[in-house]
Amino acid sequence: MIDYIIIAAYILGVLGLGVWCSKSNKTLKEFAVSNSDFGTFFIFTTLSASFIGGGFSLGNAAKVYSEGIYYSVMLLGFSLQIILVSLLVVPHISKHVNAISVGDIIEPCYGKSGRITGGILSFCSCAGILGAQIGGMGAILESLLGIPYFAGALIGCAVILIYSTIGGIKAVVLTDAVQFCLLIVAVPLLLIIGIYRAGGVNAVIEQLPPERLQLQPDGVPPSAILSLFLVFFIGETLVPPYVQRLLISRDRRKLMFGTFWSGVLSVPFFLVSGAIGLVALILLPEIDANTTFPAMVKLLIPTGLKGIVIASIMAIVMSSADSFLHSASVAVVKDVYLPLAGSENMPDRHKLLAAQFVNVVTGAAALLFVLFIPNILDVLVFAYNFWSPLILVQLVSALIGLKVRKSSFFVGFFAGLAGSLAWNLTLGRKIPFDGLLVGVACNLICFTLYNLVRRPPTVAQKDEKDSLILS
């Protein structure tokens, strides 16, 4: 009974925080990025909590349980990406001080059509990645509390919908900070208790099948290993929630420090969560891999402490899900609905209500991913295909201020789409190399060549053209 009380208290606390934050939400900008004055600690915790999520923790443990530790090592591609973003992209973010969405960054370079396309892609990728987190919530509640999988996913989604819809980015960032503090303690604690129960580190290593510790297991070709590393390196780069985290502070130094240390922290976290899968293979050799994390909690954590750990695992999922849910709603309203409807001058209150309505719709869309793709890490990889091959090159170019042709947006877009599809339908069936990477390469090559051949006009050329038109 005490465990249920603790879990209920945690949920009520999160909802209460959302209600408290709702008082400061009067405009779409406040809903999207608040007052852009968050400090280093909140940037660090909200970014860390956002990417850790169900896929990089529960899904990571499940994959290591079934396939081996190499999966956790490949996840370090994501860590490297976050660190590089802090060093190479964040210094340019001051150029976009008034932006509140990906579309605000894209439109000056690629026009309204680029903005709308970016908004649609933002929604698709966010809904897919949100689906991964909601699936994790369903698995947790089913394994630990006996709630049916889809009903658990529905309950988790409803809680996230409530506090993120009424509280906006402020509620998301503050709850992320609380949730981060919970998960950063609970996950290592679970591993330590598991190793102790298994007889110590040496006993764990001795009992594991040798192939589970190999960085290239038998039967897995080097191209598949490289592909997986690159997918995690590129796939989630600058997805909408991470871009918005770069817009919640005007202080470039705070952004750089928060982002950099978030990437550094992810390295031990990925290895620790993956190691839980290895320990589970010894203690629970017959379970369904997708239930690895909650099954370990059920086995190792005593009553009383179990409620705290379950709340922490729920925090892992909710901290990522709320970020993608929030970003999807901002993208749809700011980058799709308002430009298409010609309603940029709509009253602020109406824009806010539109974003809150879309929050609910996005949550429903995410549940569809849960129904069709069972493993949450597989959901992540699937969702990446709506982002990196189609828009990553164009977004990075806009962020760092490169001069490009507006039409180059769709040159890169269609090149990435065609490359991904062609590879997946032909060579991709024989060569274990992800079509997402081929799509990104095709996008980059065609985008670059097009801008080299058709150089963007200089300021002087634009002024001359404008004077001719006026005369």
Image (cartoon, rainbow, N blue to C red):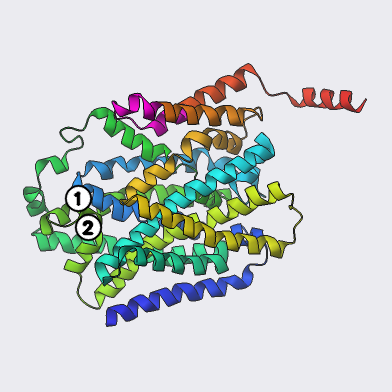
Most frequent secondary structure within the magenta stretch: helix
Quarter placement of the N terminus:
bottom left
State if disc 2 and disc 1 touch (CB < 8 Å). yes
Q: To which residue does mark 1 refer?
A: 65
Horizontally, is 423 left or right of 257 in the view? left
Query: Would you call the spot at circle 2 few (<14 residues within 10 Å), some (14-19), or many (20 or more)?
Result: many
Q: Amino acid at mark 1?
A: Tyr
Magenta range is 423-441
**Does 425 appear in magenta?**
yes
Q: Residue at x 58, y 33 (%)?
A: 397
In percent of width and height, residue 268 lies at 30, 50
Q: Secondary structure at mark 1?
A: helix
**Does 56 appear in magenta?**
no
Q: Residue at x 48, y 59 (%)?
A: 363
Residue 246's place in the image compared with 19, above or below, is above
Earlier residue among tags 1 and 2: 1
Q: In the rendered image, is residue 211 in sight?
A: yes
Residue 450 sits in quarter: top right
Q: Residue furthest right?
A: 471
Q: Residue at x 45, y 27 (%)?
A: 419
Q: In the rendered image, is residue 94 in sight?
A: no
Q: Amino acid at mark 2?
A: Thr
Q: Which mark is residue 292?
A: 2
Q: Secondary structure at mark 2?
A: helix
In percent of width and height, residue 420 lies at 43, 30
